[in-house]
Structures are given as C-alpha cells and as structure tokens.
Amino acid sequence: MAEVASASAAQLLTEARDATDALLERWARRLETEVPAPEGQALAYALRSPGKRVRAALVLAAFRSAGGEGSGAVGVAAAVETVHAYSLVHDDLPCMDDDDMRRGRPTTHRKFGVPVATRAGYLLVPVAAQVLAEAAQDLGLDSAGLGQMAVALFEAGGIEGMVGGQYLDLSAEGRLLELPELMSVHRGKTGALIRAACTLGGIAAGAGPGMMSALTAYGEEIGLAFQIADDVLDATATSVELGKTAGRDAALAKSTYVRVLGIDEARAEAMRHAEQAVAHLDSAGVPAGSLRALADYIVTRSK
Ligand code: GRG
C-alpha cells in the first residue's frame, strides 16, 4: 500500500485543534443558550477548555491512513474529545483526584461548584452521542456505521474501558501494584479512549478488517505509551508546564510506572510501546503516515 503524505505531529495537532475547537465552540454556544444556567455555562466551560487534542489528531490520522478523505472525521474527533472532556471534569472532582487546575484554568468544580460540575460532566455524555450521530451523517454512514462507532466509543468510555480503569486506579490508591495490574489500570483509564480514537478513524473511513485490527493494535500500544509518558511528566514537569498540578501521583500515593520502574526505565518502556505501535502498522502494510509522527510525539512531549 502506498504511504500517505505524512504531516508532522505539530501540524496535525494544530489542524486537529483548530477544526475540533471550532465544532466544539458551536456546541458550547448552543448548550449555553439551551441548557439553563449554571449547568449550561459549566458545559460550555468544559467544552472550551484548551486541550492538546491528541485524541482528535489520532482520529484524523487514522482516518487518513485508512484512506479517508475530506473533513467528515472532524465530528468523530469532537465526539471523542467530548467524552475526554467529561472524564476530566469528573476526574478532577474531590471524590476522585481532587484537583484545582486543569489546562491552565480552574477545574470546572472550582469554577462552578461540585454539584454543578458533576451534573455538567454527566450531561457531556449524551452531548458526545449527538456529536457522533451528526458526524456519521456528515460522513454519509448508514445506521450500522453509526452503531459501530457508538459501540467503539461508549464501550471504551465505560466499565470495560475508562470507567473500569479509573475505578481500579481509585481503589488501588495507597497500595503498590505489580506491573501487570498497573498495566490494566493504564489500558483502561487512559488507553481505552485513545485506542477507540484510532479505531473510530478507521470506521469513519470504511476500513476493512485487516486495516481495522492494525489500527486497533496501534491504538492499544500508543494508549499505554501515552499514560506511561503522563506518569513521567507528572514526576518531572512543573505545574505551569502541565497546566495542572504536577506531582499529584506521588501526593495521592498512586502506583505509576515511575514508582515501579523509575523515571529512566519508565521512559524506555513508553518508547518500546510506541515502537511496537508503529510495528503493528508496518507489519500489516498499513501506511503509517502521521500516526508514526504522533507515536513519536506522544513519548517525547513536554506537557
Ligand atoms: C465512575 C469510577 C468512575 C469513573 C468515571 C472520571 C473517569 C470516569 C475517568 C477518568 C479518566 C482519566 C481522566 C484518565 C486520565 C487520562 C489522561 C492522561 C488525561 C490527560 O490527557 P491529555 O494529556 O490532556 O491529553 P489534554 O488536557 O491535553 O486533553
């Protein structure tokens, strides 16, 4: 298969951010007017929160690697970022990681209070479903295509993925996990949604089974690499660089790759997973294109 033209990670992240933010801004305006205050304002605040848009970039890169053309996948990217936005609002709540700063701004509950932030977080889930349904229409997918995307996104966001991983993570606080258990926390809590971003890009492009399994295998490895890199950044970067409180894992006595392996070995492990991710694409003959650049970015990023 021919290699697709590959954008640099920086170009792709900028493109993903501009396109996704524009779509999320339309939803923020709509929700601000349709949902009574203060929940409507809290929803808009969470959707306008300036993330790096890595998951959106993965959707777009996977879409193109699978032969997708045009801008139809932007809605899919926005749906994934909406689920991510919900998870951050809830993750920051006092009953979870209890954090004051996110993306360089006060967390949603610090701005609107815990009850409003909790409700706004839940409300983002059906919003994500609506964003996804509109994206399926833009892509010209039939109801089976929408169903396949919905299963990929909401299974990853649920008990078999993100919620399950977060639950394990919270219940393990103060206890040192062995590597296999830690790996399942990371695969669920963070990896599942990142893997789904890659899978969804493939579904949006109408990819066949070989391409789909390569994209999913890439997503599985890169999701793990992402959270290991996140563990390293939490231990080595500053709060200003991260836009959130650094050193939170140590403060909460969490098991992390840094705690289990040390910083250097954790970094090396993230690199190994990133290489493995790209190897899945190469060995299936899938044009890696920008997915290669994103794999590299994910393990070398500074925030
Ligand atoms: C009901 C138990 C239960 C859970 C609810 C809250 C939740 C579900 C899950 C939390 C999942 C979570 C927040 C995992 C951390 C993922 C992570 C590394 C986030 C940071 O991602 P970046 O660096 O952030 O891409 P930006 O801000 O750039 O988007």
Image (cartoon, rainbow, N blue to C red):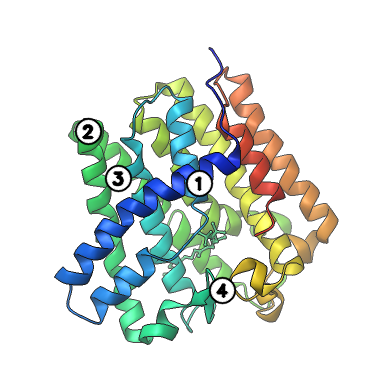
Three-letter amino acid code of the residue under disc 4: Ser
To which residue does mark 1 refer? 14
Report, in whole angstroms, how far the alpha carbon at label 4 lies from the one at label 2: 37 Å
Report, in whole angstroms, how far the alpha carbon at label 3 lies from the one at label 2: 10 Å
Extreme residue toward the left, this view = 34
Q: Earlier in the sequence, mark 1 or mark 2?
A: 1
Are discs 4 and 2 less than 8 Å apart at CB? no
To which residue does mark 2 refer? 144
Q: Secondary structure at mark 4?
A: helix
Q: Earlier in the sequence, mark 3 or mark 2?
A: 2
Label 2: few (<14), some (14–19) or many (≥20) C-alpha neighbours in 10 Å: few
Q: Position of residue 131 (x, y in %)?
A: 26, 50
To which residue does mark 3 refer? 150
Give the numbered dot on residue 171. 4
Q: Is mark 4 within 8 Å of ligand 1?
A: no
Three-letter amino acid code of the residue under disc 3: Ala
